Amino acid sequence: MDRIYIEFAEEKLKKYDISFDSAIEYLDELFAKFNMEQNKEGWYCGGSFETIGAINIILKKTEWFIKCASKWLWFQADDGCTEDVLSFYRDGEQRYLL
């Protein structure tokens, strides 16, 4: 199963008037909708490639998320690769499509 790991920059959350607890609550509720839970290491686990792709699109479209995230990783079980999703979206998707 694929999994996602996310960290927030607390100073950026404060800048956008979002508490750390409410940001984590948002993630927990979002992942729960897709039957995914956070493990002891902080990874949200239990998702398929398609499920995590859908979650990534939702997070990308969440106005404050990319501005406040400090780490957003996607471990893809089929190839054992970990992708830096935050860099992908921050640096621009075009760079990866060339």
Image (tube, rainbow, N blue to C red):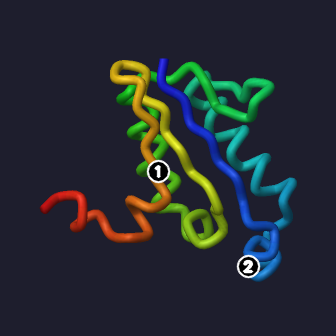
Q: Are marks 2 and 1 in contact (CB under 8 Å)?
A: no
In the picture of the structure, the residue carrying the numbered disc 2 is 16
| Residue drawn 59% across the image and 72% down it | 67
Residue 35 appears in which quarter of the rendering? top right
The quadrant of the image that shows the C terminus is bottom left
Tell me the tag on residue 84.
Answer: 1
| Residue drawn 55% across the image and 28% down it | 34
In the image, residue 54 above or below residue 68: above
Say what amino acid the circle numbered 1 marks. Asp
In the image, residue 96 above or below residue 83: below
- SS for tag 2? loop
How far apart marks 2 and 1 lie (CA) works out to 23 Å
Q: Identify the residue at the far left of this view.
A: 98
- SS for tag 1? strand
Asked whether, in this view, residue 15 is left or right of residue 36, the answer is right
| Residue drawn 62% across the image and 34% down it | 31
Residue 63 screen position, x and y as percent: 55, 70
